[in-house]
Image: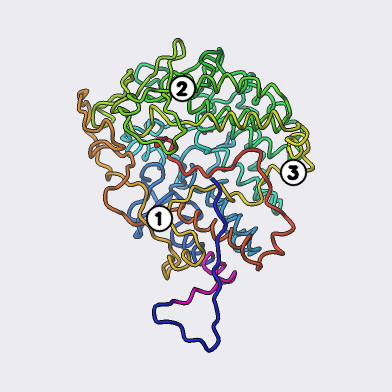
Amino acid sequence: MKISRLLTSFLLIYSGLKLPVAAQPEPSPTSGEEVKACMLRATRFMMDSISYQGAFVWSYLPDLSRFWGEIEALHRTTVWIQPPGTPSMGQILLDAYHATGDEYYYEQARRVADVLIRVQHPEGGWNYVEDLAGEDSLKVFYATIGRQAWRLEEFQHYYGNITFDDEATSLAAKFLLRLYLDKRDAEVGKAVDRVIRLMLDSQYPNGGWPQRYPLRFDHPFRGKKDYSSFVTLNDDVMIDNIDFLIQCYQALGRTDLLEPIHRAMYLLADLQQPAPLAGWSDQYESNELSPAHARSYEPRSINTGVTMNMIRTMCNYYCLTGDERFLEGVPSAIRFIDSLRLSPEDEERWGRPRRREEDILVPRFLRPEDGVPLYVHRKGSNVGNGRYYTDQDISRTIVHYSSALYVNTHELSDRYEELLSTPKEKLTNLSPLLYPERNSAVPRFYYGPGSLRMNPRYPREADEIIRAQSPSGAWIFPLDRISHPYRPMPDDQPESDDSSFESTNEGDEFDTSTYYPTEPVEGISTHVYIRLMTSLIEYLRFDCDTTADSIGKQAHHRRPRLLRFRHRHDDFKR
C-alpha cells in the first residue's frame, strides 16, 4: 500500500478584497527549513533524552519510569535489536542524513552503530535484546520479566547465542552495511565482515539457516525438542539472510557469496510440499527437511500464511534470476490455498470481519499428513499454570497468533500471469544478482513510499506533524502496548482450566506479556518517531525543492523485494 506524497496547500492572496466572516485563509505551504528544524528537534530529543548512549528499546513513559521492547525492559542499559529498536533507529537516521546532508544525522547513526558493535556477539550477530551492562544484567532480565512472559516463549530461556529471528541479526547487519558504504569506516566494515562470516559459518550444507547459532539443544519444552536448530522460514529468517548476502554481493563485490545465495534460494523452492498440500512450513528438521514444530502455539504444520509469502518470494526470485524453476510450484500452491476455503458457518464462528469482499477465510495450520486444520487454544492464566493445545474448533482461538486468516488468491494469480506474459529480459533488467553494475541492492532510503503502514491516529501532513511536536521536540502519543508491572510468580502452580484468558493478549497479574491498554497511556515510541520522520523526509524528497540537489544524484533504488516496515510484534500476527 503506497503512502501518498504529502500535499502542500497554497495561500490565496486577495488584494483589497474583504473576506466573509466565515471564510478562513488556507495555511501557507510548509517550508523545507521548517521541516528540517522539526526533524532536528525531534532527533535531538530522541538521542539526548530517550536513548541510552545511542541504544533504544521501543517505547517509553515520558518520565522514563517504564519502557518496553517486545516486552518490558528491566534496565536503562537495554539494547533492543528487534525492529523498531536500535538498528531501526539507525536506519532512519541514515535516511535523514541522505535527505538533508546534515552531518549531525550521520554522527548520530554512528553512535547507534557503536552500540551495536559493542554488543555484537563474537559469532557476528545479535540476540533479540542485548545489554550494555553485560551478560549478567541480561540474564537477570531473562530470569524475571522474560521467564514470566506467557506467550513470548522465546524470552523464557536464555541461550547466550544469536538469533536470525525477527530480523535481529539481518537488520542490524543491513544498517551497518549502509553506514559503511557512506564513508567506508573501517570499524564498521569489520563488523559487517563478522556478520558475513557468521552467515557462511551458520548455513547448513542444504542451504538453510537455523533460527539460532551456534547451535543449542538445551531447551526441550513441554515434551518437544528444542526447535532453535531447525531450518527456519518463520518471520523471513531465510529471506532476510538472503537479502543481506545479495546486498553484500552487489555493494562489496563479494562474488564468493553467489553460491550460498543460490543454495539458499533453491532450497526455499525445494521445501514446498507435494500436492495436494503444496505449501510451506514455518520450520523444518535440519537433516530430513520435514515440517517441524516451534513454540507451543506453532504446531508442526503446513502454514498458509507462510505459503502466501513464499508464493510472492518465488515470483521475486524469478525476477532476480530469470530461472523458471521458481515459478513451477506457484500454480499448485495457489490451488492448495483455494481448496482450503472455509464455510460461511466457520466464518461466522470465527467472528472476525473480512476487509475485502474477494477475500476468503482459510485455516493457518494444516496437519502435514492429512491437511486437517489445527486451531490453537489455551487454558490457564500465566506461564506457570497455563498450556496451549490444538483441536478442530475454530471458535475462541488465541488472538495473539491467528489460527485462520483472510487471503486473496486472485492477486497472486494475477501476479503469476503478469510474470508469464512479460519478457524475461524486462523483468530481470535491474536484478542486482544478474547485473550488479546496473542497480543497487542497498537502498539509499530504507523507509520509503509503501514501506510504512500509517496508523490514522498519527498525523501525515508536514504542517500537522510540526504542530504535534512538543516544545521539547517529543512526539507524544498513546502507546500501542503496555504490560503488567513485574511481580514474582508463585512456584509449583497446578495446571488450570481457567478460560478467562483464552482470547486475550495478556494473562493474570503475573504475566509480563504486552497487551493493548483499555485506557490511553501516553508515551514516546521509536515507531512513531520513524513514521513521522519518514513523512517529513518524503516531503523533502518529493514535495520541496530545498533538497533537490542533495538527492537528485542518487535516486531511490528499488530493493530486491518489497520493503516493509515490520513494526509487528512476532506474537501479534493477524
Quadrant (top left/top right/bottom left/bottom right) for the N terminus: top right
For the residues carrying marks 1 and 3, which lies nearer the camera in this image?
1
At mark 2, the secondary structure is: loop
- Residue 337 pos. (x, y %): 50, 22
Q: Secondary structure at mark 1?
A: loop
Which label was assigned to residue 227? 2
Q: Which residue is mark 3?
A: 439
Q: Is residue 93 left or right of residue 354?
A: right
Spot the residue most to the bottom: 16
Residue 457 — which label?
1
Crowdedness of circle 3 by 10 Å Cα count: few (<14), some, many (20+)? many
Amino acid type at mark 1: Arg
Q: Is residue 469 magenta?
A: no
Question: Which quarter of the rendered picture does the C terminus lie within?
Answer: top left
Magenta stretch, residue numbers: 24-39
**Are circles 3 and 2 on residues that touch, CB within 8 Å?**
no
Evaluate whether residue 525 shows in this view: yes
Q: Which corner quadrant of the image does residue 548 belong to? A: bottom right
